[in-house]
Every structure is written in structure tokens, then in C-alpha cells.
Image (cartoon, rainbow, N blue to C red):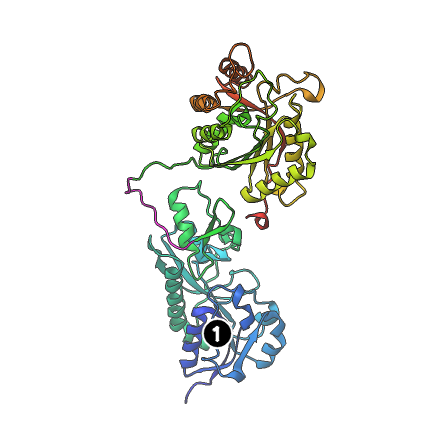
């Protein structure tokens, strides 16, 4: 006499869930009274989402959001056993206690190890060479129930997430086929998990997908393998904050490539904007630092507000090609872009202030600097004072433009900063120093591009004075030659993800 049909409820999804349903439907003793699967609206939130419309008759298919909302319905179906495959929600006690032959689950790890969330992802991330699937009786704990059986499988060095998922799916189906009759009869093995020996993996979050390039190559590759499709893919960020997805990678120690062009996490590699009143101010005050930024791979832009010639004293040498001098100095320093404006020399205080602010705002909007350099606000030169005020107003941190600027620093300009009254707010009192010894020759060559601006003797714009000032600042900071800065604002907090780009 044939055995009585066993009333079965299925809860699940994904590829292994579909294959499990096919096994259940093909078994002569299984009466699949209902299949509870995630509603189509849940597809965007579930990696590897699958539908079951083509497998299960409409009258037996339930599309749900939360399984806990259907406890009464499941109780009314009176199942003898429930199978849960490819389903990540916790099954509540109101359902666990319904079937007399238990609720059977599958976990993609060798229990009692690696209970919890995303076990296959963490297995690859952690560099495991073997894992498995455990078939077990579900209880109120997280993957703590009695084990029916385990099937192990290897993780090859070049396996990505899809490869490991296929192996886990195969192992799940092998376990189901091997133990299905025993579950239906109530004779399947029940091996309690050893008390106190369980370990847990945590839920994966989007932040876990960001590549940390400071980690060893094999760890970076493991992360990329682990998050390959159908998972959301590992990501990094370009210099402009736009995410870049990386689906596949390998470590290649056998390749002989040139050394990296740029140091990892180099603080000098930034988006840099320097705003000055006149040509030569940028080289005198911050030329060495701009050269270091350029060497580190920074995009360096200099904005010059006035041509700097119109109001020279009669006995002062004039230069009809001062813009060309500025471009030549920029080439020596590695500055990428120089922008010139035609505001009146030594009369910037006669220009409507909002016009100066708009020029600086436009430069910030175009170049999105993370570091901003400008004149010291206490300089003797009025143009320098006005430019400082305009830069500060344009980069106020409460504004969307100013929010991109992490550091705002002011520099000293020989013949202006040192000629201001050495009292009160006029005093340049630096606390930030940059070692410019390695690029000093480049600064000197850039200064030589301004032959009418460099003055000999005891004038502050002599080569001897400029080097002496750098030596003094080096002495203040433990370097041989240094440029000095007064930080006006420095923001160290890591920007939130929504602020990127």
C-alpha cells in the first residue's frame, strides 16, 4: 500500500530555491500545498532574485514581503514539514512550531561555524579554500538547530561569487535529495551542534564593498571575487568622487611594471586652487608647495586677479609680457591651469566686492578644490587683503561650494607680508610647514621667469632673501628649506557618502 502523501510548505527564493521546488514536485510522496516566495517588488533588494510563476500553480503560490505576516495561513495549511531554501528572513516561532516533522533549513557554511549572514561572501573575503552547506532543523536561534547533514566543497583561487554560489546550490540539492525520504518519514539524522562552539558572520552592507587599496593585493582580489555578480560588485571612487565598479581582478606579482606614479594616500595629492592678486605672488609665496602637489599628481590651478603692472612706481622696471612670465613659471612648477583676470592693479578695493567673490566662486565650482591657498589677510598690500577676503567669502563652509574645501591656508609674500605692521592681526604666525628642499631648484627657476620682479640687494624680493626666509621657516619646523602657512580652516571629518562628487 503506497505511503500517505506528506503535506509540505515551501518558503524560499533564488536559484537553489527553484531547484528545491523542482525536487519536491518530482517526489511521489510530496504534496506541495503552498510555496511562499518573495513578491516581485522585492527584486531590487535581493541579489539573485528569481520568480516561481512557471513552477508552482497559481493557487498554491504566495508572493509575500514578510513571512511572519503569514503565520496564521501556514497554520491553517497544516503542513507536516516546511522546507526553507534561499530565504534570508528569520522564521518566527509562530511558524517553527506548526509542522510536526520540523522546519528544515539550509545554511551555506559548515555548522556550527559561520552562522549568520552572507556566509559565502565572507568565506571568499576571508580566503577560505573550503566551505560547505549544512542541512538542519531550524529552531529559534540563528542557525543553531540539529544538523541533518553537511556537504563540503572547495573554493578555487579563481572562483568568484557566481562560481561558489553554483557549488553551494549543487550541495544544497544533493543534501535535499539524500535526506528527503528521511525527513518525510521522520527518520532523518539529528546531530545537536556542540554548545559554545559557534561562530558568526555579520550582515554585509554597501560600505563593505568599498576597496581599501592599502590592504594586500590578495585581500583586494578576494573582495572583488566575493562581490562579483550576482552581488552588487566591489567599488572604489575616482578623484572626482564618482564610483567605479570592479567586477574582476587578479593579483599579478609576475608582472614587471614601473613603480607606482603616485604614493598611496599621499596628502599632497589633492585638487588644488591658488588665488593671488598678481603674477609672481603664487611663486614667491607657495611655489615650492605647488610643485610638490604637481609631483604628487594633483590638479593645480592658479587664479590671478590682476596683471600687476599698471600702478607700478615710475622707477620700477616694467614687463609687457608678465602673463607670459606667469605661464612660464607655471610650467616650471607643474601647474596645470592659470586663469587671468583684468581687475585693476592696486585698486582691487575699488571693485564691487561681489564681483571678486563671483570670480573665486566660479573657480571653486569649476575645479572643486580640496585645498585652497591665498594671501595672508594682514599683508601690507591692499590687493592681497581684498583677495583674502574674497576667497574666504567664496569658500564659506556653510555653502555647497565651500563644502568641498577641506583646507584653506594663507601664505606669506616677501615684500608684502614682512612689510606689514608686526602687531595684532597683521602678524603672520605660521603653524603649518611644507618641506620644499626637494623642489627648491624648480622654485628658483620659476622665480627666474619673473626677471623684472626679482630685485637684488637687501630687497625682500631678492633670491638671497627668499632662500633665507625658507631657511628660517625650515629652522622653525626641522627642515632645511620650508614654506610656511597659517591655516584658516581645516576639516578632518570624513565626508559622508552622499557628499561625494
Could you tell me which secondary element the residue under label 1 belongs to? Answer: loop
Q: With respect to residue 44, does 429 lie above or below?
A: above
What residue does disc 1 label? Answer: 51
Find the magenta span and give its range.
Answer: 246-256
Residue 232 position, x and y percent, is 47, 58
Toward the viewer: 441 or 26? 441
In the rendered image, which quarter is residue 371 located in?
top right
How far across and down, in percent of the image, does residue 10 sit? 50, 75
Would residue 493 be seen by someone viewing this image from the given angle? yes
User: Which of 481/61 is in front?
Assistant: 481
Confirm whether the magenta stretch covers residue 501.
no
- Quadrant where the image shows the N terminus: bottom left
Q: Position of residue 125 (x, y in %)?
A: 43, 51
The image quarter containing residue 263 is top left
Name the residue rendered at 66%, 25% in the picture: 382
Q: Is residue 494 visible?
A: no
- Is 99 situated left or right of 376 in this image? left
Q: Residue furthest front?
A: 314
Tell me which secondary structure the magenta stretch mostly adopts.
Answer: loop
Q: Is residue 250 magenta?
A: yes
* Number of residue marks: 1
Amino acid at each position: 500500500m503506497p505511503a500517505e502523501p506528506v503535506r509540505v510548505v515551501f518558503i524560499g527564493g533564488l536559484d537553489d530555491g527553484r531547484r528545491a521546488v523542482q525536487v519536491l514536485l518530482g517526489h511521489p510522496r510530496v504534496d506541495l500545498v503552498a510555496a511562499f516566495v518573495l513578491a516581485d517588488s522585492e527584486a531590487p533588494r535581493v541579489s539573485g532574485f528569481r520568480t516561481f510563476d512557471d513552477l508552482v500553480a497559481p493557487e498554491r503560490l504566495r508572493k509575500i514581503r514578510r513571512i511572519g505576516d503569514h503565520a496564521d495561513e501556514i497554520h491553517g495549511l497544516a503542513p507536516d514539514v516546511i522546507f526553507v531554501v534561499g530565504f534570508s528572513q528569520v522564521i518566527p516561532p509562530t511558524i517553527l512550531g506548526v509542522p510536526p516533522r520540523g522546519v528544515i533549513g539550509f545554511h551555506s557554511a559548515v555548522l556550527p561555524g559561520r552562522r549568520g549572514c552572507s556566509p559565502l561572501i565572507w568565506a571568499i573575503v576571508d580566503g577560505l579554500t573550503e566551505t560547505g552547506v549544512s542541512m538542519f532543523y531550524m529552531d529559534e536561534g540563528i542557525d543553531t538547530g540539529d544538523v541533518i547533514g553537511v556537504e563540503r566543497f572547495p573554493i578555487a583561487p579563481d572562483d568568484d561569487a557566481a562560481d561558489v554560489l553554483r557549488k553551494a546550490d549543487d550541495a544544497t540539492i544533493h543534501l535535499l535529495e539524500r535526506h528527503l525520504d528521511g525527513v518525510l518519514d521522520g527518520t532523518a539524522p539529528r546531530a545537536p551542534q556542540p554548545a559554545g562552539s559557534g561562530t558568526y558572520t555579520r550582515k554585509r552592507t554597501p560600505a563593505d564593498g568599498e576597496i581599501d587599496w592599502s590592504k594586500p593585493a590578495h585581500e583586494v582580489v578576494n573582495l572583488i571575487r566575493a562581490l562579483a555578480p550576482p552581488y552588487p560588485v566591489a567599488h572604489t571612487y575616482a578623484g572626482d568622487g564618482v564610483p567605479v565598479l570592479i567586477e574582476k581582478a587578479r593579483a599579478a606579482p609576475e608582472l614587471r611594471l614601473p613603480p607606482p606614479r603616485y604614493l598611496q594616500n599621499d596628502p599632497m595629492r589633492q585638487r588644488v586652487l591658488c588665488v593671488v592678486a598678481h603674477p609672481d605672488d603664487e611663486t614667491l609665496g607657495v611655489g615650492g608647495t605647488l610643485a610638490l602637489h604637481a609631483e604628487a599628481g594633483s590638479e593645480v590651478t592658479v587664479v590671478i586677479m590682476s596683471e600687476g603692472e599698471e600702478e607700478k612706481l615710475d622707477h620700477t622696471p616694467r614687463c609687457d609680457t608678465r602673463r607670459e612670465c606667469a605661464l612660464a613659471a607655471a610650467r616650471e612648477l607643474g601647474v596645470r591651469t592659470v586663469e587671468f583676470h583684468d581687475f585693476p592693479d592696486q585698486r582691487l578695493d575699488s571693485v564691487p566686492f561681489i564681483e571678486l567673490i563671483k570670480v573665486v566662486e566660479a573657480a571653486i565650482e569649476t575645479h572643486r578644490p580640496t585645498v585652497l591657498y591665498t594671501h595672508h589677510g594682514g599683508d601690507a598690500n591692499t590687493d592681497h587683503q581684498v583677495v583674502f577676503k574674497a576667497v574666504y567669502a567664496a569658500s564659506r563652509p556653510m555653502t555647497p561650494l565651500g563644502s568641498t574645501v577641506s583646507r584653506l591656508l594663507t601664505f606669506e609674500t616677501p615684500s608684502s607680508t614682512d612689510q606689514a605692521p608686526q602687531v595684532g592681526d597683521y602678524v603672520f604666525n605660521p603653524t603649518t610647514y611644507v618641506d620644499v628642499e626637494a623642489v627648491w631648484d624648480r622654485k628658483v627657476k620659476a622665480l627666474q621667469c619673473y626677471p623684472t620682479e626679482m630685485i637684488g640687494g637687501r630687497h625682500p624680493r631678492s633670491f638671497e632673501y627668499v632662500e633665507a626666509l625658507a631657511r628660517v621657516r625650515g629652522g622653525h619646523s626641522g627642515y632645511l628649506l620650508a614654506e610656511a602657512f597659517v591655516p584658516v580652516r581645516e576639516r578632518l571629518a570624513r565626508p559622508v557618502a552622499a557628499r561625494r562628487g
